[in-house]
Image (cartoon, grey):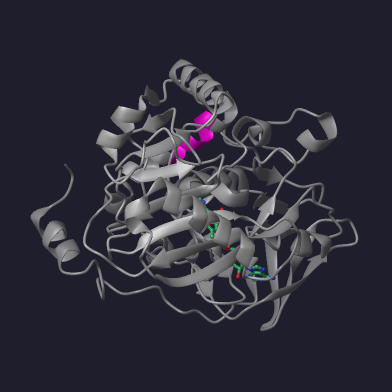
Amino acid sequence: MRHSLFSIVRNAIGGNRGWPAQWREAAPKPEYDIVIVGAGGHGLATAYYLAREHGISNIAVLEKGWLGGGNTGRNTTIIRSNYLWEESQKLYEHALKLWETLSQELNYNVMYSPRGVMMLAHTVHDVQSAQRHIHANRLGGIDNEWITPEQAKAFCPLLNIEANIRYPILGAALQRRGGVARHDAVAWGYARGASALGVDIIQNCEVTGIDRAPSGEVTGVQTTRGAIRARRIGVVAAGHTSVLMAMAGVRMPLESYPLQALVSEPVKPIMSCVVMSNTVHAYMSQSDKGELVIGAGTDAYTSYSQTGALHISAHTLDAICELFPAVRRMRMLRNWGGIVDVTPDRSPIIGKTPVPGLYVNCGWGTGGFKATPGSGHVFAHTLATGAPHKFNAPFTLDRFRSGRLIDEAAAAAVAH
Ligand SMILES: Cc1cc2nc3c(=O)[nH]c(=O)nc-3n(C[C@H](O)[C@H](O)[C@H](O)COP(=O)(O)OP(=O)(O)OC[C@H]3O[C@@H](n4cnc5c(N)ncnc54)[C@H](O)[C@@H]3O)c2cc1C
């Protein structure tokens, strides 16, 4: 364990408030080496690793709202790496390994909790698909195991495994190293780390245009706080990537959908793992505050509204009450939505664009929180060197032209 007694005591009394300082709220400078658009977890992690690993700190992270107020602060925080395809496994496993030591790395408690993620199988097709994943994961050196309904019940006593329920449980895939983390702490931890290394974090600064030289390369951005010059621009603006890239004349293979979640009133600890059901599209865990965190599906229609259709969450609650009858009478405390941008193959795009100096990191859809440290790490490498890191090399924009897709859509149906 790399915790010092001091850091254990500090975290126990409420994290790192005031030590040594929160991030610095900066005023924009006229010129930067790199401008990152979007102060979510991915953008902030990118800035942190650029400064920490590549020695580049003349960076501004521009945020139209407040830090972490996008999907980073709205998601249900499921972390896992048991994806089907080798390319995805490597990328998400890279992130999972970084999660394991992130609190120590940032000296900020991100409350990563590897409590196990269990994915239920309700049909013969589910069983076959889950077992295919498990075999693929084992070949890739990633933990994932098949458990019986009785073992699932032992792992999560709340679960109803009776045979006569609407969604009978035929077994489950369990990744024990999967889990959850505290979403806003991740944004704050990376922000504080980047700020301490000299990065400017500028909130309430919406990018409204991308400037290009007559020869094509980017020269800076127009913002609600004036023009800012930059040699390189990294767009990390989940849900709004297409809007930003259109400012530079680049058309993206993305659609934006509302995705919603809800939490119950807080109760004493009743659930010590994450349970997901991809078939009925409901999943649940319990936060450290005691609330049951419940995730629903995306709306059927594209939209930029940060709320989802009520029938989607009603369906999710139906399923939750069937799977966990003990929670049937609990009250829901609040619900909300975020905008996720989705690629045709449900895998991200991380890398160069046809515009010199313009880079993009997007398309994480419903499942990018888990990737935050890995995504920032490989995107920083790409921005710093102009070449992809080995883990993001397959995740090019060009794959939608060449047809070399990484189809986690057909593989997983859901990608939280
Ligand atoms: C309800 C819900 C549940 C989810 N559950 C999970 C889960 O359990 N596990 C998981 O792995 N993932 C989950 N996700 C997905 C995950 O939240 C995202 O993939 C991830 O957080 C994306 O991080 P980000 O930093 O790229 O985006 P964001 O945190 O959205 O950051 C992008 C930022 O860009 C800013 N921006 C946009 N346009 C501009 C502009 N013009 N100028 C300046 N700034 C701009 C936005 O304000 C925003 O703050 C969920 C998402 C939602 C909505």
Q: Residue drawn 83% across and 30% down?
A: 402
Stretch in magenta: 89-95
Q: Residue drawn 50% across and 26% down?
A: 130
- In the displayed orientation, state which residue is furthest to the right: 214
Q: Position of residue 343 (x, y in %)?
A: 72, 45
Q: Residue drawn 84% across and 53% down?
A: 251
Whether residue 266 sits left or right of residue 12 in the image: it is right
Q: Is residue 38 in view from this perspective?
A: no
Up/down of 186 relative to 407, above or below = below
State whether the magenta stretch is mostly helix, strand or loop: helix
Q: Position of residue 107 (x, y in %)?
A: 27, 58
Query: Does residue 92 show up magenta in the picture?
Result: yes
Up/down of 213 relative to 123, above or below = below
Q: Is residue 25 in view from this perspective?
A: yes
Query: Does residue 278 show up magenta in the picture?
Result: no
| Ligand 1 image-quadrant field | bottom right
Please tell me in which quadrant of the rendered image residue 60 appears. Answer: bottom right
Residue nearer the viewer, 248 or 176: 176
Q: Position of residue 265 (x, y in %)?
A: 34, 70
Q: Position of residue 54 (x, y in %)?
A: 49, 48
Residue nearer the viewer, 79 or 410: 410
* Location of the N terminus (image quadrant): top left
